[in-house]
Amino acid sequence: MTINSHITEFAGLPVVDFQPARLPDVAPDTVAWRLSLTDFPQSDGDFAELTERFLTAVDPGKVFALIVGDWGEAYEEAAPVDLLARLAPRLTGLTALFMGEMVMEQSEISWITQADPAPLLAAYPGLEILRLRGATEGLTLTPTRHTALRELAIEAGGLPGHVVRAIAECDLPALEHLELWLGTDQYGGDATVEDLAPILGGARLPSLRSLGLRNAEIADRVAAAVAGAPVVARLRELDLSLGILSDEGAAALLAGQPLTHLRRLDLHHHYLSGELAGRLVAELPGVEVDLSDVQRPDRGGDRYIAVSE
């Protein structure tokens, strides 16, 4: 499966595409602006020029949410982290950033070349939401401290283990939502449950209330680790969706620590039998359990995560 449609809302705001030839009649602080080269035939030049035209057309100090789409040859050119970092003195109100919001026609998720986001976190001390899509094997992350970040997400067809370990080393005292798409080793996703152990311990994430370990080929092992993880006791939402979760993983969840305190358990796109799915609903009264999009192995018995390419 691939990503076929753009998001329509980000950071609680409707998404508006910046088109150089026609500026929408909206206040810049009421929408999430999306900048992308390939979507707008009337745009010319490179991504830096498109960005400059955007900052000239709107009041940059009133841009709260920004979505970076295709910056041009994203399969070869790394995300424009340095460009965005240099623009921090102008984008003084920026609190939410999505880097790499592309669909299949622009780039497969595993082809998107991300860059170390640490310079962004350093340049924007008030940033509250950071979402990245795409993670090649060359992606790095420098462990850092950021006191304002509330949401961090990395969408990947394969997330390298060293990136997971670096996240665990970050000091993010305000982080409430952490979402990692672990993917498959076919696309560089070699993270293990041992890499996740510091995150699941929760000591470095005192404010965490929502944890997503999604799109995982190793979903059953992740579920078993989560079943005894200290951090789970203070979560309101747990998301193990989009992966290859089977009866083995579901049974581990039910045999582990109580999950009845959760507000929501998202397991959609799963390989559970009707019996285990029924047990989850019956044994977690009051919990919103999403068991939609049930999958079945193909004729060869193979199972697939939701987003891998």
Image (cartoon, rainbow, N blue to C red):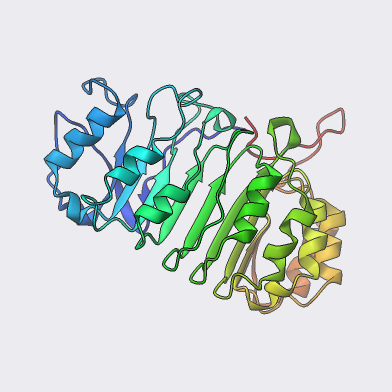
In-front residue for pair 14/229: 229
Q: Check the picture and name the quadrant holding the C terminus.
A: top right
Q: Where is residue 237 in the image (x, y as percent from the top left)?
A: 60, 68
Where, by quadrant of the figure, is residue 210 drawn?
bottom right
Q: In this view, does 149 lie to the left or right of 186?
A: left
Q: Nearer the viewer, residue 200 or 122?
A: 122
Percent across and percent down for residue 83 are 33, 38
Give the percent coordinates (x, y) of residue 104: 50, 27
Q: Which residue is drawn at 67% across and 53% down?
A: 165
Image position of 142 (left or right of 282): left
Q: Is residue 302 above or below residue 155?
A: above
Q: Is residue 122 above or below residue 294?
A: below
- Above or below residue 133? Residue 12 is below
Q: Is residue 88 left or right of residue 122?
A: left
Q: How many marks?
A: 0
Look at the image and tell me whether residue 17 can be seen: yes
Q: In this view, does 30 lie to the left or right of 57?
A: right
Q: Can residue 268 be seen in this view?
A: no
Residue 228, quarter of the rendered image = bottom right
Residue 135 is situated, as x and y percent measured from the top left of the image, at: 58, 37
Q: Which residue is drawn at 81% across and 31% down?
A: 298
